[in-house]
Image (cartoon, rainbow, N blue to C red):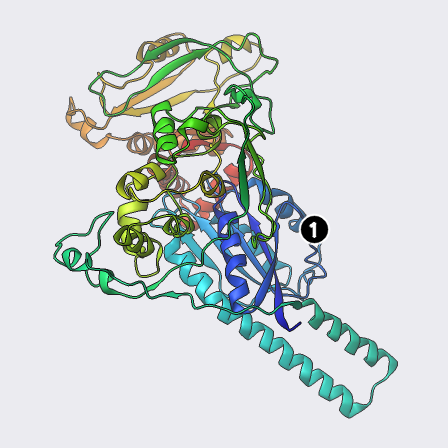
Amino acid sequence: MCCEVKKRFLLLFGTQLGQAKAIAEEIAQQADGHGFVAEVHSLSDSDKFNLHDEKAPVVIVVSTTGTGDPPEQALKFVKEIQNRDLPANHFEHLRYGLLALGDSEYTFFCNGGKIIDKRLQELGAQHFYSTGYADDCVGLELVVDPWIEDLWIALKKELMSRMEKDTQDSLGTMANGISADQGASEQDSLDSQMQLLILEPAAQTGTTLSQSVIDGHAGAQNQLSEPSLTQSIPPLSQSPLNIPALPPAYLDVQFLETAGQEANPVLLCSEEAIFQVPVLKAMQLTREDAVKTALLLELDISNTTFTYQPGDSFCIVCPNHASEVEELLHRLQICEMEDCPVHLEIKPGTKKKGATLPQHIPQKSTPAFILSWCLEIRAVPKKAFLRALVEHTTDDVAKRRLQELCSKQGASDYNRFVRDPGVCLLDLLRAFSSCKPPFELLIEHLPKLKARSYSAAREKLRAQHAELTFGETWLFFGCRHRDRDYLFREELKCFLENGTLTHLKVCFSRDTPSYPERATRKYVQDYLRVCAQDVARILVKEKGHFYVCGDGKNMARDVTEALMDILSTELDVDKFEALKILATLREEKRYLEDVWA
């Protein structure tokens, strides 16, 4: 049987919400068509790979979480490489390429990848391919797609360079005679080359270019002045398309006839215990005409076994809306089986490398349970999902449009009509009614339904810890309108009167200023600048703590910039030195953020 020699590289990923893993899987899937085979591992599985002895090129995909931290899956790896006992040449043999994921709306953009990149360089590793910085603010695919496309060229150049070097070394050895030690060296070189090669059965490779035929409906499309989710205009509607390879199916779903289990979130798989608790009270804190609605929920946790401290967070598991679940069941044409237990198994002969059963779906769950509690049905579909949906769409115009949206040529339309407006699977099924995906396709492509985290606080911290000495306590509070969304106004007033707070600075960004000075104090960062001397004194001279809670993409970023300005001005240092001071505050856990996107 004829065999094809494929060149091996090591592919590592560190993910928080699954994006880095999905991109790594896409790279591994494409590798086959370019004559490579990827050995894929999570950075958390450091027992399955050994960079110290790795001879093959290494590709790393890593995301950023929080306000600039490596993802949880990468923390163990980061700790290992940050060991200061490692010599400066520890990774001098290593050649790698790194793709960092982040969001430029946050101050420390792609910092998870930058931390790993910098440390590998410090330990002697070298790039064979330039680092990519993908920005979720404008669309990861704008960087990810071309970075992957050029990766194969870089890998081929790297391997060609290695082979040329080994050939030159071998010729030099032959010219000078071979000693025992030299023979061992040549064997090491041979072993090194063997690590780069994998023998697999030869397979015919198909073109990745989709020359989709535009049927008779195209003429009507061409008359449109504006494109939409369901229709395109020239030149896209007339262009040949580069579409992603079809993701291999890897799950089989069997509907059992026995009664299924009742939908109960306690059955969900989790690293932590899950408790089902009653809601004692629900109260709206904002007025009806407020821009956003804020609710106060009181939960009865008296019968639970856990304890918490201020700063801890509760992860609330919120099910998907029942009406959306019912509509999905209807569109998938499995309403009659919504309460039948489901058995999942790996599809025999699947081409998906390392295929595993999803751990977030308990075996023998019902479709109703899975769609309610396990899958994020409102997630924006990735291009790989759109590509898979093409195969289950019967209408030619709809099929062509889905191909466009997942293609390289249709990247702008994908951002405009899918990513930016937050289109979900249900929106697509409504728009493309001939699309009827099987249930297993949703399990393969929809991410796990994430719990929502809420910080815990205790309002009487001073009273509970009377033995402690508290310094000044400043609160800078901002909202849009004094009368619509000034949350906990009376409670904050009481805190100021009883000494819990020594200073309360409140600003209202949408109200008409009551006096001229107010016009310059629309946001909390404005008030921080007004109180710059006190802020710098408390943080630097008195070793105070700074807590930020709010919108991570706008408010937290602006507060960080204001604080850098304050430190620079009040301490008479440049911006770079101010940034170093801020970084020190973070390391000492004296600058803490509890923010959301």
Left or right of 501? Residue 396 is left
Helix, strand or loop at label 1? It is: loop
Q: Residue at the spot x=71%, y=83% of the render?
A: 169
Query: In the rendering, at what x and y percent does residue 269 appear?
Result: 58, 29
Decide which of 71, 224 is in the foreground and name it: 224
Q: Residue at the spot x=68%, y=58% of the render?
A: 51
> 306 above or below 204?
above
Residue 553 showing in the rendered view: yes
Decide which of 473, 134 is in the foreground and name it: 134
- Kindly indicate the quadrant of the structure image that contains residue 186: bottom right
Query: In the rendering, at what x and y percent does residue 306 appear?
Result: 60, 16
Per the image, the residue denoted by label 1 is: 48
Residue type at tag 1: Lys
Quadrant of the image containing the N terminus:
bottom right
Query: In the rendering, at what x and y percent does residue 399 appear?
Result: 31, 53
> 131 above or below 460?
below
Decide which of 567, 101 is in the foreground and name it: 101
Query: In the rendering, at what x and y percent does residue 512 appear?
Result: 15, 25
Quadrant of the image containing the C terminus:
top left
- Kindly indicate the quadrant of the structure image that contains residue 198: bottom right
> 192 above or below 110?
below
